[in-house]
Image: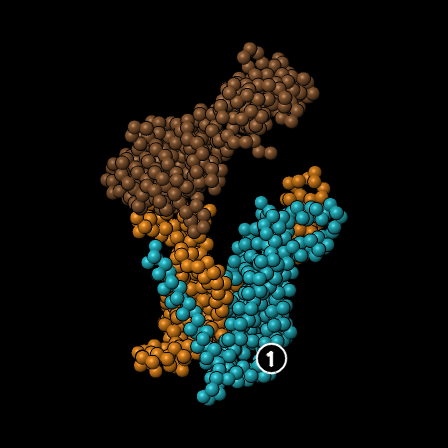
Amino acid sequence: MADPFLSIQHVRKSFANATVVQDFNLDVGAGEFVSFLGPSGCGKTTVLRMVAGFEEPTSGAIMIGGKDVTRLKPNQRNIGMVFQAYALFPNLTVAQNIAFGLRVAKVPKADADRRVAEMLKLISLPNLGDRFPYQLSGGQQQRVALARAIAPKPKVLLLDEPLSALDAKVRVSLREEIRQIQKDLGITTVFVTHDQEEALSISDRIVVMYGGRAEQVGTPFEIYNRPQTRFVASFVGTLNILKAKVLNGATGTIAIDGQQVTASGMKNDATNGAERSVALRPEAVSLNGIGGQRNKLDGTIEEVNFLGSVVRIRVRFQENSVSLDTFNNPNAPPPKHGEKVTVSFAPEDLLVLEGEAPN
Amino acid sequence: MTDITSVEPGIVRRGPTHLAAPPDVRAGIRLPTQWLGVAPFFVFAAMFLILPTLYLMIGAFQNDAGEFTFENIAALSQPSIVAAYWISIKVSLASAVLGAFIGLAIAIAIVRGGLPGWIRSATLTFSGVASNFAGVPLAFAFLATLGRLGLVTVLLNTLIGLNLYAWGFNVLSFWGLTLTYMYFQIPLMVVIIVPAIDGIKREWGEAAATLGATQSEYWRMVVIPVLWPSFLGTVILLFANAFGAIATAYALTGSSLNIVPILLYAQIRGDVLHNAHLGYAIAFGMIVITGLANVGYIVFRTRSERWLK
Amino acid sequence: MKSGRFWAWVVFAVGAAYFFVPLIATLEFSMRMRRGVYSFDAYKVVLGDIHFQQSFGFSVIAAIFTIIVGVLIVVPAAYWIRLRLPGLRPIVEFITLLPLVIPAIVIVFGYIRMYGSNSPLPFLASASGTNVLLVFGYATLALPYMYRAVDTGLRTIDVRTLTEAAQILGAGWVTIIARVILPNVLIAVLSGAFLTFAIVIGEFTMASLLNRPAFGPYLQNMGANRAYEPAALAIIAFAITWGCMSLIQILSRFAPKSTAR
């Protein structure tokens, strides 16, 4: 990256008896939308709180716009933050909440009023300025919280699981709205979530975190399709993990339950005869597929789950089985339990995970 | 009271609830039982709470012949009664306001002050005890502390030569009574206000900080306005709490400090005002004051609960 | 942050001093009866006083009857309101708040005027009638606390489901209340009972105006006539209050945790 706007350098955070973030490095470009994705306790919120200034790094530095902010107090950093629990001030109206940062910054009243009106329009609540937070729905409250955070034109916007407290439907519509507003304003944003679908759908880049470390940094496409570690592969998306034996490390030939297939992602260092874990996305596998150069495996239908637009089918070989997704077709009923079938997939879709296969 | 118990079960059974659910036969059978369950409560409340109070309130507007009159209420304006009301209001207000501020400071210290956790639970437990430690024994405790021979009085005199009584202090006075009342007012404030302070979410402070506010701006613009209704509501409750109290004051000062409950006590014992209906009027005045105070309490309470839910 | 903690300690220390100094002073004063040395003479005198024993016994019995009356009135009402008559809840809650609004002295004044010897219900015509009236008066004073405690207890157990489960198993109303509801709200009822006890035991106004030989008037009388005994009595009274509150605290640890929504 030529010119990182937000730069987190070798940041470590230890509490009394535990290190929760270890050697965390990340450069975020101006206007970029980066998500921290990981299970609870992975350190993603701690990193965000260090950027906000609520926690001080044990070592390392945080730069915003080329300026070292590591030791600055939160109220000197010019950041905006949205919290999971909305955190609107209950004694202030919607308009007063949005104007809070402007009032503190001593922005003239007329300018502040104009900015508040602009923000209310931006979040599509132009007529609710005089309401109190308790009179709004959760989704509306979170939109107000977003408007409040961006009204003082912060350099960086931090979103701490802002959608977790909302209903499923609102969650989807609001995340699209957040992304749209972020793009329109071009504001550099860090978004913390444990929901992979959320992270995949709105991020420019994703940092998958585990055990206080960044496991992988990449675009949603890379993270989903080319997971580099077993953790990323298992945490992001549904994944079939199969046990395979390496037949020829150089050509990428492996055997799954005795049937020979090719994995193009195989590294040359794999010793012949070694056990390895390989992974397959359900949507990469097709049933009775066509195409010459694809891998094929014969098996038996073990389970059919009708999920609406998608039908999820489990096919068992011997020791291993895979789940695969097919689209629902009203004119062709799904296969029956016990039917003999052949599944196929492209060699490049077979992901070889690092390390020996665990038992 | 008798009009509730003498209602025939059959009449109750044909009540509106039965009409609302005609197909449900069981509801018809259950009706008398459920009224039986609440009937003792209502009979009791009517006989020992509502009717005696109404009796006095009506009596306040009657003369000896039983005719309607405002004379008793007007007679409350005689100087001795006005003075009693005034000193009652002053003691109640002083002990409520001082108790509320000190209680608030203690509550903030134990909730937000970064003190060890056991201090919070110990303080809350103690507050539960002390807020119920009122009446005659409390007066004894303060006599033993700040009376002429009380420990603190004696110690101050022998150690630093400060003679409280020479400086005009007297535990049997306005300030003595106020100081004593604060012994149950402060803990009551702590018990009531701690949940409200707990309701101040940490995220509010963090949100304010990211928006550029200093700690004092955050307190001025958010914390104080949010706590204000609970605080004011509790002050009013403390006021009513002190206004109706008599035992502590009576045991402490005898009848040397003429507060309203002591005046009423003397009136009940011996009709010192030589007018039974004037006693009703004094009682009526007390109910009006504590009643208004409680309406205020409920109004403020509702507002803060709406905010803090 | 550091200075904040410093001030928190200061506030806490000043507060603690205000609350502990009177207790220490009272304790010290109560032990000064024998000249020159500390002794428990005042306690011996008090505990050996026949009037103490009688008035304390009277108040304990009054408190027990108050608790029984309170439970009998409050538990069925709170139960039926939760179960079948939720519409009555605001009215009942309002009524239970009234004793906090109407001073005790006003309530007892009403009793004296309403239930005199010439009235249709002459409670005051006999000593035993007056005792009954006193217990009812105490039950009125304790009503807000008793109702709150029982209602909280009922909220944490799912009354409706428990009742329906008992009905399906063929239980009648008496069985349901005695065997299902009461055991489950027993902790809450006991909490209310101890609070009632703490309020009733030293109550002065009602007992004094109804001329009953209770502990409160005895205390007042001692205060007016003796020097050291009142301090000993204050310590004893504080210990009783403390005991009641501790029992409530201990009981609350055994209370069922919320299972209802």
Q: Amino acid at mark 1?
A: Gln
Q: Chain of mark 1?
A: C
Indicate the chain coloured brown by its letter.
Answer: A
Q: Is residue B254 above or below residue A344?
A: below
Colour setup of the view: by chain
Q: Is residue C206 above or below residue C148?
A: below
Position of A201 with respect to A188 (left or right) is: right
Position of B139 with respect to C146 (left or right) is: left
* Chain B: drawing colour: orange
Q: Can residue C66 be seen by looking at this rendering?
A: yes
The residue drawn where x is 57% and y is 81% is C47
Which residue is more in the foreground, B208 or C119? B208
Q: Is residue B59 above or below residue B208?
A: below
The residue drawn where x is 30% and y is 45% is A72
Q: Can residue A75 be seen by looking at this rendering?
A: no
Percent across and percent down for residue C197 are 58, 67
Which residue is more in the foreground, A163 or A3? A3
Which residue is more in the foreground, C140 or A88? A88
* Chain C: drawing colour: cyan
Residue occupied by mark 1: C53
In terms of image quadrants, where is residue A286?
top right
